[in-house]
Image (cartoon, rainbow, N blue to C red):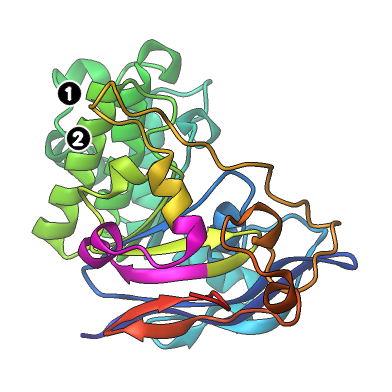
Amino acid sequence: MDKLLEIKNLNLFFGEYQALYGINFSLNKGEMRALAGESGCGKTLTAMSIMRLLPKSAIIKSGEIFFDGENLLNLKEKQMRELRGNKIALIPQDPMTSLNPLYTIGNQLIESIRVHTGVSYHQARRKAKEVLDLVKIPDIDNKLSYYPHELSGGMKQRIIISMALATKAELIIADEPTTALDVTIQKQIMDLLDEIKKDFGTTILLISHDLALVSNYADNISIMYAGQLVEEATSEDFFKNPVHPYSNALLRSLPSRNPALKLKTIEGAPPSIQEEINGCKFHPRCEFCDLSICTASKPVLKEKSNGHYSACLIK
């Protein structure tokens, strides 16, 4: 399959402290890949590196990010602005960060379409109604006159998704898109993203800490811990046969429908970027740790079976 996005050996620092370590993964066209892990593991930093929307204190010291064969890190800011919202769209955790509370939904959606496509106001309004219909917004004519605060969280997320559809974005980066929503609305938003992938061939990078959610939608999954990728596999293979001790611990911590089974938590907490840990960064929390092995060298992703990669020194 054709690769749309490929990240090669991405290393990111805040001053002297390293936050991302040699990130390598790719997305094929029409794929939904989940990037999962605990809060603070580097998922959003990876997404913001792709978008080139990092804070000024963040420095990419090495690595390449190819989108459709072009290294995004070599583009000028004007070129990146043309890509953002046009070929690459971001769905944030909180849609209010992308919607201006002072303007109606119609004004913002129509303006976005006109900026990225150059069509007339009337053409943009017609397109806006088309994409709102695609994301199942009811009573469209009235909703165009609403302000963001008049819509529910789920409706606001649908508006953001409609903006990506309006410009025919090839890649959607969905950064915890269902975090602030209740369970039924979460499923509706994920079903909508799944439909977009299938109907339009859109490539989706789904960033989440919720493995139960992504298990039903992602084609492939990459697990992050402390700024590193520790496991990568198809979703089917990952959930049947997780290899890395961190992945196993994450899956054991998921709620079960069996009331007799108690949740098993992961002892300790993820390290901060200022914390120096020799060898494997997970070893202080790992039930399989052998200090003589796990502190001697840093693990890297290695293929354990067909297309299933893990970064563990002892498993």
Q: Residue furthest right?
A: 16
- Residue 104 found in image quarter: top left
Provide the residue designation for mark 2.
Answer: 132
- Residue 266 higher or lower than 239, as above or below: above
Q: Give 34 or 288, whichever is nearer the viewer.
A: 288
Region in magenta: 230-247
In this rendering, position of residue 248 left or right of residue 273:
left
Contact between marks 1 and 2 (CB within 8 A): the answer is yes
Q: Residue at x 55, y 76 (%)?
A: 314
Q: Residues within 10 Å of mark 2 (few under 14, many from 20)?
A: many
Which element carries disc 2, helix, strand or loop? helix
Q: Is residue 230 above or below residue 71?
A: above
Residue at the extreme left: 199
Kindly identify which residue carries mark 1: 140
Q: Residue at x 47, y 36 (%)?
A: 264
Residue found farthest to the top: 150
- The amino acid pointed to by label 2 is Leu
Per the image, label 1 sits on a secondary structure element best described as helix
Mark toward the start of the polypeptide (1 vs 2): 2
Residue shown at 53% from the left, 21% from the top: 102
Query: Does residue 118 belong to the magenta stretch?
Result: no
For label 1, the crowd category at 10 Å Cα-Cα, with few meaning under 14, some 14 to 19 and many 20 or more, is some
Q: Is residue 2 left or right of residue 309?
A: left
